[in-house]
Amino acid sequence: MARANDDAAAALTEYAELFALTGGDAFRVRSYQKAAKAIAGFPEDISVADVRGVPGVGEAIAKKMEEFLQRGSFRQLDDLRGRVPEGVRRLTRVPTLGPKTAIMLFEDYGIDSPAALGEAITSGRLDGVKGLGPKTLANLLKGIEQLEQSGRRVHIGVAMSLAEQVMTSLKAERIAYAGSLRRMKDTIGDIDILAVAPESIMTEFRAQPYVAEIIAAGDKKTSIRTTSGLQVDLRVVPAESWGAAMQYFTGSKEHNVAIREMAVKKGWKLSEYGLFEGERVIASESEEDIYAALGMQFVPPPMREDGGEVKAALRGELPTLVQLADLKGDLHTHTNLTDGIASLEDMVAAGHARGYVYYAVTDHAPDLAMQRMTLDKALEQRQQVADLQQKYPDMRLLHGTELNIAPDGSVDWPGEILREFDVCVASVHSHFSMSRDEMTRRFIAACENPYVDIIGHPTTRKIGKRPQVDADWEAVFRAAGRTGTAMEIDSFPDRSDLPADLVRLAKHHGVKFSIDSDSHAIPHLTNQRFGVGIAQRAWLTTEDVINTWPLERLLAFLGR
Ligand code: DGT
Ligand code: CA
Ligand code: CA
Ligand code: ZN
């Protein structure tokens, strides 16, 4: 459930932007921005608590926020919204384009979007305009490109369900997704689908209801843009080149360059049609055969990033990656006691249906004030969990909690309460913009708490919405390794947190991981497959992942 804080903070941020655009005093702009951040990070819901309790919120801002809580806007915001045209606001999203220039471009040249600006620059319409030298224009073009790129990538959850929809909508002898999606990247630029099928599949594809625009239509490749804005490339490949095509279009480009070099060294040629010696086909129908012919182990797609996998595969030293089927349970889930939407009974039944050996219920703790959690409620839930346990003799229920890491690194309850939980996840849910040093100390303190078992969604990023918090991750991971605190791989696709590069760094410091769903509803349980993708991209084995371990070993790790 969204708190009033986030919407109120967004309105105040917008107000700060508009205020700056209309030539408002820079000092006040900054104070609005600061207050918005403080409101967003404030642990209590301001529709319940007095907004005057938020640091940096004085009387004037408090009045605006109170009006916002009552009617979803405030007078000064309405005023400015009326004065600044939408086009100008769109323009200011271009990096390096300031408000004054935006207004000038809009008023004097009728430019009302980043795309229109791009066109005006490339067509030379802005050449010689005062204040816009060639270097400035080149920078603006770069900024527009950046903006378009960041807007175009989507998180893997969106791309995966779209890819599955596309594949079930088409009839083919063989059909599969390749590209970054097969490599399980956390963000996807476009979806690459390969099919063995008659050419008529292209007509069928173009007629699908999810097609918004046809970008390119050919016999072998059709590119479309879907109604959600994402591009899908469909390629028809000959059955006998299936493996070579999958290898080529799975990428990454860097991995492929390295593989092709190996082929060249042997005097062979590798393309999307096969591995050849002159005209003779050495391998093409299966990917496995291609890697084998090159004298290397099969490289699982998530490892194909030219990060040492080619060398390891040549030496036969690739690790055995953790698989979805290795997971024996989930250590971070919610129920409708806090912000989940399913009951304890239903969540546990769904976990059991997935064949888990153990399942942890970790509802939020009291410091996330909007959840109105209390110790009494937690203890009552513990009794319900104990009762429910009778029904599931083959699955161990763990009663846990998701604690809130305060700015000083402390958590909601003292040790004597924490130790009665089977498992404690501790997460940052507020004060996202502390300085690097403060944030690092905050995480280290949480790791040093003997009852904190897992740091939940450590970077707290939300893809496309909220950046990672700033911390010295190396120092945090050293502390986690030393104290035996696991780092979570939160599998919610918009979180994907930790991301794979940080997982790899953490592993280097001896850290263990928990691949959790952070479910707030039953369908979320299946998100663990995305977490496994992250783990595979970071080369994790079952040894690294505590929720692949048998119950006894897990309990020993949790140390209760
Ligand atoms: P994305 O779409 O940005 O998330 O990332 P990818 O990896 O899916 O990239 P994409 O869609 O441009 O191309 C799909 C795969 O096709 C890519 O991973 C490797 C292969 N590929 C595309 N262009 C080239 C190329 O010029 N050389 C090589 N070796 N491979 C390429
Ligand atoms: Ca792609
Ligand atoms: Ca593509
Ligand atoms: Zn959380």
Image (tube, grey):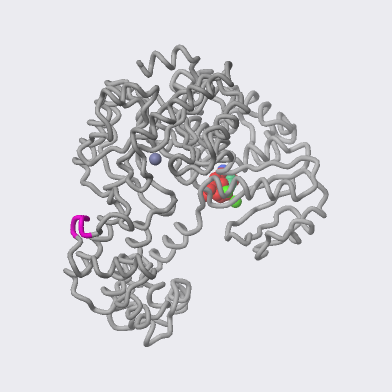
Image quadrant for the C terminus? top left
Point out residue 227 in the picture as x, y percentages from the top left corner. Answer: 62, 62
Depth check: 344 or 423 in front?
Answer: 344
Residue reaching furthest to the bottom:
108
Which residue occupies 57% across, 16% down? 393
- First to last magenta residue range: 52-56
Residue 401, located in which quarter of the rendered image? top left
The front one of 435 and 409 is 409
Vertical order, 448 against 1 (above or below): above
User: What residue is at 47 percent from the left and 59 percent from the top?
Assistant: 151
Q: Is residue 34 left or right of residue 293?
A: left
Magenta highlight on residue 471:
no
Left or right of 389, for residue 445:
left
**Eyeballing the image, is 92 above or below 261?**
below
Count of labels shown? 0
Image location (x, y in percent) of residue 97:
32, 70
Image spot of residue 288 (x, y percent): 66, 27
- Of residue 432 and residue 317, the one placed in the foreground of this image is 432
Q: Main secondary structure of the magenta part?
A: loop
**Left or right of residue 29, residue 337 in this image:** right
Say if 53 sits above or below 451 in the image: below
